[in-house]
């Protein structure tokens, strides 16, 4: 049986007699990870910062073990107060977004999936909706607009269920963008106009800006530039 120990930087490894990770028969088992900085100083104060540090320590251990975060099959997270769950989940999601920007799509999908499971277990529809929208963004970066559309539609359903209007406006525009990039321009136009109307009602400058940009793109694809300006004045 192959067995290899992977040490970390925790000052407690020698005291308590454990390793950061153990490789056995091609599997990497990572020890419970606390937010202990490399110098052994006090952990960060915030739940987000503590979770982010734990994830970084785990990622480094996996790298030294010859694996990576995209091979993770299960994450167990323990918090001392349920009130901290949102910040911990946000750290999980932030890692996934960073990996998406680095084109580490498998790693990103793994972490978005873990974040989605965490929000589902906590019964948080807004967290689930935001994560579905993030997964859609991951697929859009890979130009897999059909997959992105399915996740954005799930996000819209969740936002509508809990009456989250800002989320609805954002996802309506994203759905329009996905349709546009699949050549379904008239359908895209309908969704983006709905997004713009909702953003105007909410007085959301960011939502309006993104909807105008999408509408401009769609109308250029349709070739009706003058109609584009007329429509924008009428909305």
Image (cartoon, rainbow, N blue to C red):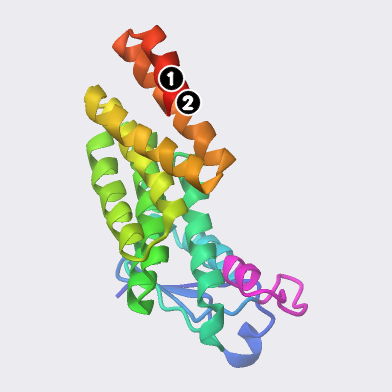
**Crowd rating for badge 2 (residues with CA inside 10 Å; few <14, some 14–19, many 20+):** few
Please say if 162 is above or below 154: below
Does residue 190 show up magenta in the picture? no
Which residues are the magenta region? Answer: 36-53
Q: Which residue is pictured at 34% across the width and 77% down the height?
A: 121
**Crowd rating for badge 1 (residues with CA inside 10 Å; few <14, some 14–19, many 20+):** some
Q: Which residue is pictured at 41% across the width and 78% down the height?
A: 76
Please say if 219 is above or below 149: above
Taking depth in this image into account, of 113 and 136 the one nearest to the observer is 136
Q: Quadrant of the C terminus?
A: top left
In the drawing, does residue 187 fall left or right of residue 235? left
Classify residue 132 by image quadrant.
Answer: bottom left
The circle drawn on residue 216 is 1
From this viewpoint, is residue 153 visible? yes
Q: Position of residue 145 (x, y in %)?
A: 27, 35
Taking depth in this image into account, of 147 and 230 the one nearest to the observer is 230
Q: Position of residue 118 (x, y in %)?
A: 38, 72
Q: Which residue reaches farthest front?
A: 234
Please say if 113 is above or below 133: below
Q: Which residue is pictured at 33% across the width and 7% down the height?
A: 223
Asked if marks 1 and 2 touch (Cβ < 8 Å), the reply is: yes
Secondary structure at badge 2 equals: helix
Q: Position of residue 139 (x, y in %)?
A: 33, 40
Q: Which residue reaches farthest bottom?
A: 16
Q: What residue would you read off at disc 2?
A: 213
Q: Position of residue 227 (x, y in %)?
A: 37, 12
In the drawing, does residue 224 fall left or right of residue 102? left
């Amino acid at each position: 049986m192959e067995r290899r120990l992977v040490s970390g930087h925790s000052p407690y490894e020698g005291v308590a007699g454990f390793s950061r990770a153990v490789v056995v028969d091609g599997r990497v088992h990572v020890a419970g990870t606390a937010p202990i900085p490399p110098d052994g100083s006090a952990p960060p104060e915030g739940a987000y910062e503590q979770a982010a540090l734990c994830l970084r320590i785990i990622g480094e251990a996996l790298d030294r073990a010859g694996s990576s975060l995209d091979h993770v099959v299960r994450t167990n997270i323990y918090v001392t107060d349920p009130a901290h769950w949102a910040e911990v989940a946000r750290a999980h999601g932030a890692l996934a977004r960073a990996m998406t920007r680095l084109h580490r799509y498998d790693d990103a999908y793994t972490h978005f999936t873990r974040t989605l499971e965490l929000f589902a277990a906590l019964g948080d529809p807004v967290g689930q909706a935001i994560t579905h929208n993030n997964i859609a963004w991951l697929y859009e970066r890979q130009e897999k607009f059909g997959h992105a559309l399915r996740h954005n539609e799930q996000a819209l359903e969740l936002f509508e269920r809990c009456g989250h209007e800002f989320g609805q406006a954002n996802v309506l525009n994203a759905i329009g963008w996905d349709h546009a990039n699949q050549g379904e321009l008239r359908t895209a136009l309908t969704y983006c106009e709905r997004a713009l109307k909702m953003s105007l009602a909410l007085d959301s400058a960011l939502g309006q800006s993104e909807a105008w940009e999408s509408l401009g793109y769609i109308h250029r694809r349709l070739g009706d530039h003058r109609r584009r300006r007329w429509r924008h004045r009428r909305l």
